[in-house]
Amino acid sequence: MNEMTLPSVGSKSRYNPRRQTYNSKSSSVYKPTRSGFLRSFYAVLQRWQSETMFTSSPIKKTSHPSYRALVDNARLVTPLIIEELRKNPSPLVWVLEEAYKIHPYSDSDIGDIEATSKAWVIWAENNGQTLQP
Amino acid sequence: MDKLYNHKFPNLCNVAEKQTSPVDGRYNCIAWAFKDNRRWWWPCKHPRVYWPLDFSKKTEMEAFEDLFDQDGWEQTENCVYEISYEKVALYTLNNEPTHAARLLENGTWTSKLGPGIDLGHSLECLNGPEYGSLFKVYRKPA
């Protein structure tokens, strides 16, 4: 199931299979609301992590549909991603790099998941992207 | 626990007994094979991860073979521990690198499964649909 086609829980609108047009050229591509993707964020993350749990290749890990969904909606859930990285530095940090197209760390830290995760936490704190006020 | 692993590694059993570390997403199997538990190693520019050599204009396989060559490793048919040698095994699937393991002094191979656990194992244990099969074993003076 493509997470991007899930209707928002509690939404008054009924599920419409014709909205399953993610990646199509149709103008009716499903664009989740902030609250909609907030609800599905942990399910999408869990699916990506579990289905790539043995994979070392970053190319394969980042081509997974759930990873693509995380990138496409990263700006909606940045504080949640930051909290995950604060608790547990992981390749989830790649989502932010691809979504924001910036690297808030020095080149000497390339590949250092802990250092790059910490750099993104600091970036979030400086840019109002954390859960805490 | 085995159920989680068996569909990817049908020869692997008693995972809980073989496990030597908890899940840790900070490094991957290649890093672990090269004794680095701080970085994610792969010849890849997007996302940005660590690779010790320039790999532009190289396939993944060429980049891996270049790494072994430039770092002083030679191919060997001997898969057991030899005094004064380090050994690393490379796995491939469809001619693409998938995984690396390192031989310990006690004769056990040690691997990190992607971002997951570390475990001790035999070379055959990791053959299967996820990593393919053993491609080459390399050695270099310790």
Image (cartoon, coloured by chain):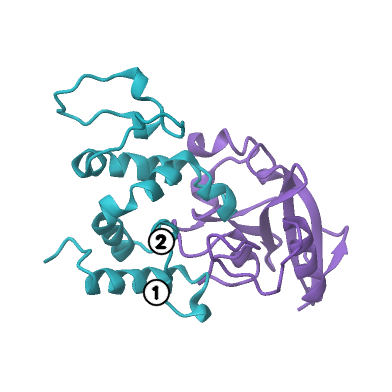
| Residue drawn at x 44%, y 56% as measured from the top left | B23
Q: Which circle's residue, 2 or 1, is located before the other in the chain?
A: 2
Residue B134 lies, with reference to residue B11, above or below; the image says: below
| Residue drawn at x 38%, y 47% as measured from the top left | A72
| Residue drawn at x 33%, y 47% as measured from the top left | A73
Drawing shade for chain B: purple
Marked residue chain, label 1: A
Residue B65 lies, with reference to residue B98, above or below; the image says: below
Left or right, residue A81 beside residue A59: left
Residue at the limit of the structure toward the left, as seen here: A133
Residue B86 lies, with reference to residue B42, above or below; the image says: below
Q: Front-most of A81 and A128?
A: A128
What x and y, as percent, mark residue B140? 80, 73
| Dot label at residue A93 | 2
Total residue callouts:
2
Drawing shade for chain A: cyan
Residue B83 visible to an observer of this rendering: no
Left or right, residue B42 beside residue A27: right
| Dot label at residue A104 | 1
Q: Amino acid at mark 2?
A: Val
Residue B85 lies, with reference to residue A68, above or below; the image says: below
